Image (tube, rainbow, N blue to C red):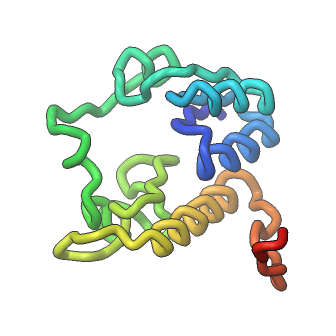
Amino acid sequence: MYLIIVGAGDIGSPLIEIATAGGNEVVVVEQNADRAEQAAQRYDCLVLQDDATVKETLEEAGAEHIHRSAAAPIFLHKQSSMAIGKVLDTGGEALSADRLFVADHSALANGVGGANPTHTGQALALRTAEHLADRYFDGVADPIPADPTPASADD
């Protein structure tokens, strides 16, 4: 499978690891130079250090069709704009586009919008990544131990 993964941070890196370990052809688009270099050194994939909001960058990454909007990016993913059950299935995958997952606050059901609850967003991102791994990569080991040792200030 040919995959374009945007971002090599906390969410993108595990996806890159799963996808490359599964023998998929992966292209990563990462704007941050340090993260792009780390991804290029760590994973067997092509890494483009560029801005994924630029059409030409996505074309260089291999995208065949790019959906664009003339609206400013701040208006594209307000909370609830991609709500689970309306735009996304319960695993965070778009109902109208196979293999397109949304793992941010826009997936949360909240009819009036509002502030993004950080911990809920982090939990949603982890949950979505687990659904993606289960559906397309035969799952992964549980990333959270059953009995985690709490961190302390002395660590």
Give the percent coordinates (x, y) of residue 134.
69, 62
Residue 70: % across, % down: 15, 32
Q: What's the residue at 50%, 73% (across, down)?
A: 119
| Residue drawn at point x = 72 percent, y = 52 percent | 137
Image quarter (top left, top right, bottom left or bottom right) of the N terminus: top right
Residue positioned 75% across, 43% down in the render: 17
Q: Is residue 101 left or right of residue 41?
A: left
Taking the image as shown, residue 148 lies to the left or right of residue 84, namely: right
Q: Give left or right: position of 70 versus 45.
A: left
Is 65 situated above or below 73? above
* Residue pictured at 79% horizontal, 35% vertical: 23
In depth, the one of 83 and 75 nearer the eye is 75
Q: Where residue 72 sits: x, y (%)?
A: 18, 38
Examine the rendered structure and indicate whether residue 59 appears above or below residue 129. Answer: above
Observer-nearest residue: 28 or 83? 28
| The C terminus: image quadrant | bottom right
- Front in this rendered view, residue 138 or 38: 38
